[in-house]
Amino acid sequence: MAHVGLIVNPSAGRDIRRLTGGASVVDNYAKRRVAECVLNGATLIDETPSVEIMPEKVGIASYAIDEAPPEMDVELVDMTIQETAADTRRAAAHFRETADVVVVLGGDGTTRDAALELGDVPLLSVSTGTNNVVPTPVDGTVAGAAATVIANGVVDADAVTYRHGRIDVEVDDVSGQKSMAGLATVGITDRSFIGTRAVIDPSDLLGGVVTRAHPAEIGLTSVAGCVEPLAPDAPGGVSLSLCDPAQAERSVRAVLAPGMTTTVGLEAHEPLGWGESKTVEGTDCVIGADGERELELTDATVTMTPTADGPRLVDVDAALKAAPEGGALLRGSLSR
């Protein structure tokens, strides 16, 4: 039987950017409804897949199971809940061994946590977070339908997925060597502490590396896209160095955060190929990935490298467009 994994992050879409900017609130009731829709969408074809859901302590997964279609075999992943990002990573590591496709409800941070553990398992990320560059703005029912046609082999998974880039980061500072990774963005901020984790002050941004770029996206991807767009499945990335727009020879007007547009001084915009690194030095700074501050650094050397080893993302439109070709969605016969 085909098997679908479902990860719902109860903390996604609820950080300080609801107070400091125009980010929308995605409460847990809304996530319950989206999770319920995903399960209903998975009944699109006769061979309904089995589903496992990451547990959490606010009842989203339990509600989804209670409201699941009667023909669906659905249960919780057997795991300890820590109420941290480690829950997402552990669930994703489990699904790497058991699932044919994984649906994630969250933002860029949740998607990154899942993607770094899923390996080659197709990932369909539904936007229910704050920074939503990578996740797809799609109805949960449609997401579940796309997941089931892939899980059941109705469509060729290779034909309806694409490989997103990843940014590998190596850091050497006074406390030793560290490593981390991002999907769409790794950014460096001129701050000595992580604080709220949200990057909410554009003047703090010093630059970073992105693997995709478009003016309609958010953060550094928007800044880079104002110079030249870069498709999510295009090779390589872009390195950005930012500065005070009043002293810059070039600047762009970009969407730095939900509800926030600002002028950004652009000191350098450098295309990078796969495996081509950008190294920067920082005295007191914080490095973040996909919209969230992660590491506090002092006297640091930071090396950021775009690679082709990112997640295998589902193209929802392509998956459902291909589904009728084998007649999987057709019952009976059509008169001509």
Image (spheres, helix red, strand yellow):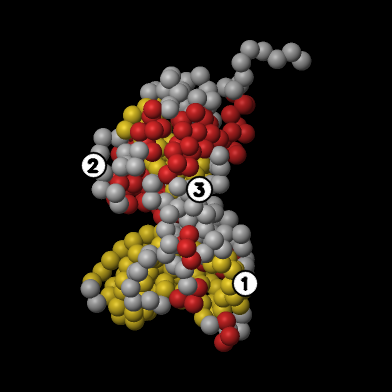
In the rendered structure, which amino acid carries the disc numbered 2? Thr
Q: Which residue is mark 1?
A: 253
* Residue displayed at 70% across by 15% down: 334
Q: Which quadrant is home to the N terminus? A: top left
Where residue 49 appears, as percent x and y from the top left, is 43, 25
The residue that mark 2 highlights is 80
Residue type at tag 1: Arg
- Determine the residue positioned at 43% across, 54% down: 14
Secondary structure beneath label 1: strand
Q: Is residue 236 visible to the viewer in this orientation of the structure?
A: no
Q: Classify mark 3: helix, strand or loop.
A: strand
Residue 127 marker: 3
Q: Is residue 278 left or right of residue 59?
A: right
* Residue at the bottom extreme, as displayed: 247
The quarter of the picture where the C terminus appears is top right
Mark 3 and 2 residues: CB-CB less than 8 Å, in contact? no
Residue displayed at 54% across by 25% down: 44
In terms of sequence position, does the residue under pointer 2 or pointer 1 come before the other?
Answer: 2
In which image quadrant can residue 105 be found? top left
How far apart are the two marked residues, 1 and 3, measured between alpha carbons? 25 Å
In the visual, does 137 lie left or right of 104? Answer: right
Q: Residue at x 38, y 38 (%)?
A: 60
